[in-house]
Amino acid sequence: MSSTFTIRDIVNEDATASVSDYGAHVLSWAPAGEQTVVWRPKAIHLKEGTAIRGGVPIIFPWFNSGFEGGHVASKKPKHGFARNSFWHYDKEGSSDALLRYTLDSSEINADILSQFVSGPNPQFHAVYTIEVGCELTMSLTVYNDGDEPLSYEEALHTYLQVGDAEQSQVCGLEGADYLDTVLDGDPRCSQGNEPVTFQGMVDRIYYSADTLELRDPVLQRTIIVAKQGAAQTVVWNPGEQAGNAIGDLDEGEWRGFVCVEAVNNRDCAVVVPPHDSHTLQQTLAVKH
């Protein structure tokens, strides 16, 4: 596996995008004639063992520090190893509109693999495809190559560019239950009939797989977020105080993005039977 930080720029008649082999990480995407949709910070820091900020990090096989036995765990690295690994770029399976990456469990440190909820020595391989066009479709398929069930958490941690987070709103989660991880004990709450807005830190795990709209009055557009194979949606923005304390962001950059993520975590973790697979997919589009 290469340890070179290769960034691939995709240009076709429908869109432009850039993707890093490190993490199989989508860094940016813009449909033709549109402003950037997938947000990236002004400066991207490339360092082995460190996650890239912005874009679409692949969260696998645990979310944050993991969840086990009904409680938050303390697994490392945060958000798993997928976003900190050099994935194999499949040149033969790729084109100017499709990128294909693979990652195999045999290439991951055994101590890290031992943290799987389903037990040590898991056998799997993952295939990640990125379809670049007037829509952006990202699909993570995990194949269980072993003889025991494989359990894991996952997310496509998508940063979406907005003109001002505090003026943006996410529609489509009305009435959904969520865990509010900003509050002590992560209490279960209900959204009510209003859209999600961003005044201060927002960090919520919604029990909803519905298609959502991120409405942005500043950039005068709506980003459509559709999901398949996801039981939950995470919505996150750090707000001013926490956002300005993030080391790899410039002051005020927190205002330029909202994260809307396709997720399976905690009590909705994936369980893949032996010699079977599961696909998590997220599709982005823009309307005016």
Image (spheres, helix red, strand yellow):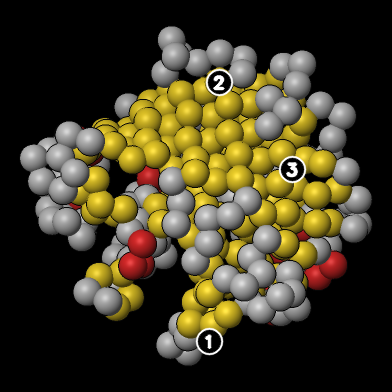
Task: Say if mark 3 contacts mark 1, CB within 8 Å.
Answer: no
Q: Amino acid at mark 3?
A: Val
Which dot marks residue 37? 3
- The answer to whether residue 76 is left or right of residue 225 is left
User: Going from the N terminus, do you reach mark 3 or mark 1 first?
Assistant: 3
Name the residue type under label 1.
Leu
**At 81% across and 26% down in the image, what residue appears?**
32
CA gap, disc 3 and disc 1? 30 Å
Residue ranking furthest to the left? 147
Q: Residues within 10 Å of mark 3 (few under 14, many from 20)?
A: many
Identify the image quadrant of residue 197. Answer: bottom right
What residue appears at the point 50 percent right and 15 percent down from the top-left corner?
Answer: 94
Task: Looking at the image, tell me whether mark 2 or mark 3 is earlier in sequence order.
Answer: 3
The residue identified by callout 1 is: 183
Relative to the observer, which residue lies in front, 286 or 202? Answer: 286
Q: Residue at x 64, y 65 (%)?
A: 173
Badge 1 marks a residue whose secondary structure is loop
Q: Secondary structure at mark 2?
A: strand
